[in-house]
Amino acid sequence: MNHLYDPIKIKSIAFKNRIVVSPMCQYSSKDGFANDWHLVHLGSRAVGGAALVIAEATAVSPEGRITPADLGLWKDEQIEFLKRIATFIEANNSVPGIQLAHAGRKSSKSEPWNGSEHLTPEQGGWAEVYAPSPIPLNDHTPPPLELTTEQIGKVVQDFKAAAARALRAGFKVIEIHAAHGYLIHEFLSPLTNTRTDNYGGSFKNRIRLLEEIVAAVKEVWPVELPLFVRVSATDWVEEAPASWTLSESIRLAEELKKMGVDLIDCSSGGNVPVQQIKPGPGYQTFFAQEIRRETGILTGAVGLITHAHQADHIIRTGQADMVFIAREFLRNPYFGLTAATELHQEEKWPVQYERAKPRFK
């Protein structure tokens, strides 16, 4: 029986435990460049005992950003500081990962603390927002432009180019962001994809963009390094005649496993305002459990995982293979160390902090 502090090896990468710092947008970049904030934010979580630290949703193109303050990896100049971050994470006994993303119709917005409002070009946003279909996010945003097949091809190449840059920056894990109502999820869900070409309609057509992105990324991403995909396992819109559901997520996971994806990071929702979510502790863990059970692929559980025993229980009961923790790591950057103490697991502390380490009798 595995527990939270058992190591796990995926491809050539050995993770010292099952704790992952989930990618969390910081909205603290200028022109997509990482800076000291990102170094301290991500580096401190590596010092804090996480096995894998994943950098926030990193835009593969300028128009793929959620806000003008998003991290980016669409040009070579952005590699240098990210390499500094990846090197620091690895030097502190953790694995550096990065999430690659395109925001789709949820792009060109202000930061959350500024209201997440749609930004016009005059306000620092961009003139053209793209999605699979011209369906506005809500009553306060203009309809996006429908991507042409040529533009879809560019999106695929943007992911490929960003993956190559991530490798040059020293990251050892890539996670493709296909959740939370961003571009790839918009293609997956019938609620946001009403296309009638090869990218819309049937399940096979709706997953086509993600499959093409995975295939393109694998052309430049070494076979020995892990590749993750984050999905929204359900749209949480049960009354809709057609929406993205857990059963389709299971089918998708089966296809991604065949393509060589190593782990499905199982989140949910974020696609439409009418979603009906009842959040509670570990409320999304069931999705990780079912996808793992039905397909045999490794899964990560995420969502209101806040306590050591809760995280350990998820691993011990086989609900998931790793736990992805977000807000608790904002409250406690050293969760990986403090949880070990709570669980009476021996965990190596940084030598600089050894004098503060609790001792077991």
Image: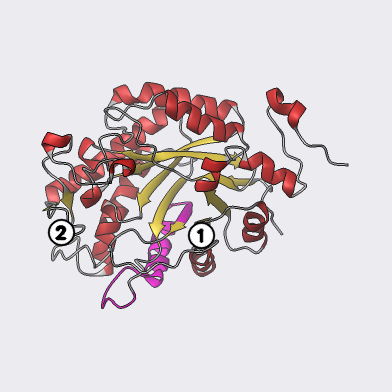
Quarter where residue 73 is shown: top left
Q: Foreground residue, 141 or 360?
A: 141
Is residue 67 rendered magenta in the image?
Answer: no
Q: Is residue 33 above or below residue 103?
A: above
Where is residue 17 drawn, in percent x and y?
Answer: 64, 45
Q: Is residue 147 left or right of residue 327?
A: left
Q: Dot 2 corresponds to which residue?
A: 133
Please identify the quadrant where the C terminus is shown: top right
In the rendered image, residue 358, in percent from the top left (x then y), is placed at: 78, 37
| Mark carried by residue 297 | 1
Q: Going from the N terminus, do you reach mark 1 or mark 2 first?
A: 2
Q: Position of residue 153 (x, y in %)?
A: 19, 46
Q: Residue at x 33, y 30 (%)?
A: 29
Give left or right: position of 109 versus 304.
left
Q: Residues within 10 Å of mark 1 (few under 14, many from 20)?
A: many
Q: Count residues near mark 2 (Cα–Cα under 10 Å), then give few for <14, some for 14-19, many for 20+.
A: many
Which of these two is toward me, 121 or 83?
Answer: 121
Regarding mark 2 in the picture, which secondary structure is present there?
loop
Residue 167 against residue 258 in the figure, above or below = above
Q: Is residue 40 above or below residue 105?
A: above
Q: What is the C-alpha distance between the residues marked 1 and 2? A: 31 Å
Eye-nearest disc, 1 or 2: 2
Q: Nearer the viewer, residue 17 or 199?
A: 17
Q: Residue at x 35, y 55 (%)?
A: 179
- SS class, disc 1: loop
Magenta stretch bounds: 238-265
Res 206 quadrant in image: bottom left
**Amino acid at the residue labelled 2:** Ser
Residue at x 60% of width, y 28% of height: 92
Q: Amino acid at mark 1?
A: Ile
On the image, the x and y values in percent for residue 62 come to 22, 35
